Image (cartoon, rainbow, N blue to C red):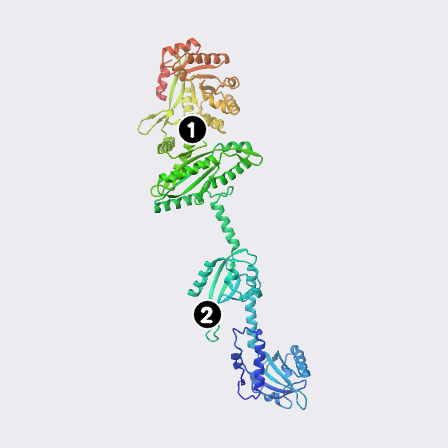
């Protein structure tokens, strides 16, 4: 601002020195308005003002006033200069008048200059803020006042606006910072103080990049983008005063230079604390992709990494490997020590597995006691990948050998590991998982506590098994299973009953026997549904016999799987079949195996007792081939012992088989149990049995298993 003589707006006032005092006073008090946004010089050139002189009296009767007084008050200058003119003091609002008088009195008493602001009532009744700069001057007749008045209202309102805007910025929750082009901080609001820990006084003039920058490359990129594009937004990591890293969602805006005032450019930085959001996102990510118990990647994460590994392998032509690791007999620990001990073991196993692999490789938990190791594809050949995988697999098996300390319990566990190599040009996620899983089962079948590589021949067997299971499900839906009935005869060759035997007639007409599919049905659990169909069909056929007098006395034996017999709903299910078919249960005989009786004797005995009350009889099938169950025979409600055909095959040539058959017959006789022999194929075998005291027979000597229609014809002809 110029320090030369200033002219009043109309150019007529002689008090240039007073006008200069006003300018100096306003510059000295520039805090009342933002000096960077308001130009006092421009404001003074456009505001009406008035120079004045008055005697030292209470009413401030003016001796001289410039024409600007009319623009200021609305009264002509002559109104104040008349003999009985308007005392200027009367225009001052009563509530401000006392303060003005006091300031003037102090100035007069001390002979000093003064400055003040107050409100006046103008001729039109409006209110204005007045800025007054005055001086007490000594004169022969006493002190006088002279000075300058101007309309301060616009400046006052602008000051309030600036302060109000500054207040809003200070109240903002976000951190708002202004930085100069040399990165030095020129503005810092309360939100920035709360977020970063420094006060505005502590940071003003310091370099933003030195104070807060937690990620220099990201900061540099944001700076360059702001200069090039005028703005930038994104996420930045900043360092708090206490050294803690805080994540912010930040927007940088370049403030262009003011050409009129030559104000330099600035960058306005607005940052929002997103640390809690980032923490929640990380928590959600861990829940989605990590196992909560072991902190290992979970199935979803494994599948994603395996897919990426295969894609990378397809591009690089490198090979890797996948390993399935399954703890042996883990269920025993859960059952004996509780699930807490089981969880501790899984956590300890996870840590040992992590120490068996390279940093680039991955250990994941699929669930339960199943873990997977992904060896990244870095080898040039499958052979190289297999060699690396074998090294890791051997380390895994060896690592599990050392006992685990589970609280106060020492526990030793072994692991079965299945390994398959992978190459993205031919393998898929599904095929790789399937092969590693199949290899793991190969390791289980080889005695556990070992590792096995995927064998295509074994895989073919597994594939065939899967196809067989699918075909059995189709057979159930399409009615491909049938029952055949093999006659059972007494010593007079009279048919007294039959055994229901399952057959599977394929769509091409070929007939499959149980030995070809029952094992797969047992392993897959389909035996439950198949067994239900067998019982329903057999009971329906038996009910049919019972409606014909010449066949009403026949019994029907049905084999029941151990898996089915131990089902919780077996008894209600069987009762439902009885009601559905209308069969009389007294003619139904269920054949149980020795393995079922011994494995769960208590439950088996309870179920047998319930069914015995409904009239069902029981036969112990394949007696003598399994366990030494003689001690249980007298405790079970059995009706019949069945000599297995394996003893009958060589009964005439093998003395041991002959002795066993005689013992079984004698045991049955002593216990009051009926004895039946299956696999009777020659008259000599029948004669041997008769001589030993067995008089009920079943076998090819009499008849093969027949369809329901043919069995009915055979039974009627054999009476």
Image vertical order of residue 212 relative to residue 295, above or below: below
Q: Earlier in the sequence, mark 1 or mark 2?
A: 2
Q: Cα distance, mark 1 to mark 2?
A: 81 Å
Q: Secondary structure at mark 2?
A: loop
Image vertical order of residue 590 relative to residue 173, above or below: above
Q: Which dot marks residue 134?
A: none
Image vertical order of residue 187 relative to residue 81, above or below: above
Q: Give the image location of residue 287, x and y in percent.
A: 49, 46
Q: Give the image location of residue 174, x and y in percent.
A: 53, 61
Q: Which dot marks residue 522?
A: 1
Can you say which quadrant of the picture contains the C terminus? top left
Q: Which residue is mark 2?
A: 256
Q: Give the image location of residue 230, x and y in percent.
A: 44, 65
Q: Give the image location of residue 431, x and y in percent.
A: 37, 39
- Toward the viewer: 562 or 571? 562
**Quadrant hosting residue 650:** top left
Q: Is residue 123 visible?
A: no
């Amino acid at each position: 601002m110029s320090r030369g003589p200033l002219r009043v707006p109309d150019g007529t006032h002689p008090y240039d020195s007073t006008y200069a005092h006003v300018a100096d006073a306003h510059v000295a008090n520039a805090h009342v308005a933002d000096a960077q946004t308001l130009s006092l010089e421009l404001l003074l050139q456009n505001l009406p003002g008035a120079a004045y002189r008055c005697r030292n009296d209470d009413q401030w009767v003016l001796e001289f006033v410039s024409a600007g007084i009319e623009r200021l008050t609305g009264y002509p200058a002559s109104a104040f200069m008349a003999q009985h003119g308007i005392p200027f003091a009367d225009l001052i609002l009563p509530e401000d008048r006392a303060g003005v008088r006091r300031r003037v009195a102090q100035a007069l008493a001390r002979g000093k200059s003064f400055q003040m602001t107050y409100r006046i009532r103008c001729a039109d009744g409006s209110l204005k803020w007045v800025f007054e700069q005055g001086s007490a001057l000594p004169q022969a007749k006493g002190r006088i006042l002279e000075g300058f008045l101007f309309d301060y209202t616009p400046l006052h309102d602008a000051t309030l606006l600036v302060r109000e805007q500054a207040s809003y910025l200070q109240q903002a929750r976000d951190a708002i910072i202004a930085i100069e082009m040399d990165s030095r901080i020129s503005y810092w609001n309360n939100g920035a103080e709360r977020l970063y820990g420094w006060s505005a006084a502590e940071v003003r003039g310091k370099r933003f990049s030195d104070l807060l920058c937690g990620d220099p490359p990201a900061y540099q990129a944001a700076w360059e983008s702001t200069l090039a594009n005028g703005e930038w937004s994104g996420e930045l990591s900043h360092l708090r005063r206490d050294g803690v890293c805080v994540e912010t969602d930040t927007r940088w805006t370049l403030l262009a230079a003011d050409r009129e005032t030559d104000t330099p450019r600035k960058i306005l930085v607005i940052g929002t604390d997103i640390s809690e959001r980032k923490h929640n996102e990380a928590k959600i990510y861990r829940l989605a992709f990590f196992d909560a118990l072991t902190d290992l990647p979970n199935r979803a994460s494994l599948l994603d990494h395996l897919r990426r590994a295969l894609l990378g392998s397809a591009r690089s032509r490198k090979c890797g490997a996948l390993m399935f690791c399954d703890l042996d007999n883990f269920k025993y620990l859960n059952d004996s020590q509780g699930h807490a001990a089981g969880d501790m073991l899984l956590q300890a196993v996870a840590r040992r597995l992590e120490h068996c692999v390279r940093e680039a490789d991955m250990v994941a938990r699929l669930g339960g006691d199943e873990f997977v190791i992904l060896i990244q594809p870095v080898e040039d050949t499958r052979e190289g990948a297999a060699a690396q995988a074998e090294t890791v697999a051997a380390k895994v098996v060896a690592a599990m050998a050392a006992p685990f300390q589970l609280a106060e319990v020492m526990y030793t566990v072994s692991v079965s590991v299945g390994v398959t190599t992978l190459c993205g040009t031919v393998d898929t996620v599904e095929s790789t998982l399937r092969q590693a899983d199949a290899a793991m089962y190969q390791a289980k079948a080889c005695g556990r506590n070992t590792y096995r590589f995927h064998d295509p021949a074994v895989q073919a067997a597994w594939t065939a098994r899967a196809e067989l299971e699918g075909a059995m499900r189709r057979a159930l839906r399409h009615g491909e299973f049938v029952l055949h009935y093999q006659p059972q005869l007494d010593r007079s060759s009279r048919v007294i009953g039959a055994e229901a035997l399952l057959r599977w007639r394929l769509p091409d007409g070929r007939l499959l026997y149980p030995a070809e599919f029952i094992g797969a049905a047992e392993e897959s659990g389909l035996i439950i549904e198949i067994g239900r169909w067998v019982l329903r069909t057999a009971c329906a056929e038996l009910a049919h016999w019972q409606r014909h007098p010449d066949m009403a006395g026949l019994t029907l034996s049905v084999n029941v799987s151990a898996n089915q017999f131990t089902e919780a709903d077996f008894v209600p299910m069987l009762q439902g079949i009885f009601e559905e078919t209308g069969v009389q249960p007294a003619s139904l005989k269920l054949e149980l195996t020795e393995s079922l009786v011994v494995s769960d004797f208590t439950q088996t005995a309870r179920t047998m007792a319930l069914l015995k009350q409904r009239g069902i009889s029981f036969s112990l099938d394949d007696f003598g081939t399994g366990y030494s169950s003689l001690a249980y025979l007298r405790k079970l409600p059995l009706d019949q012992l069945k000599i297995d055909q394996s003893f009958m095959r060589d009964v005439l040539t093998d003395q041991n088989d002959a002795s066993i058959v005689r013992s079984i017959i004698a045991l049955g006789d002593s216990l009051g149990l009926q004895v039946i022999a299956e696999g009777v194929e020659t008259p000599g075998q029948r004669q041997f049995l008769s001589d030993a005291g067995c008089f009920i027979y079943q076998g090819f000597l009499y008849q093969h298993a027949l369809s329901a229609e043919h069995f009915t014809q055979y039974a009627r002809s054999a009476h």
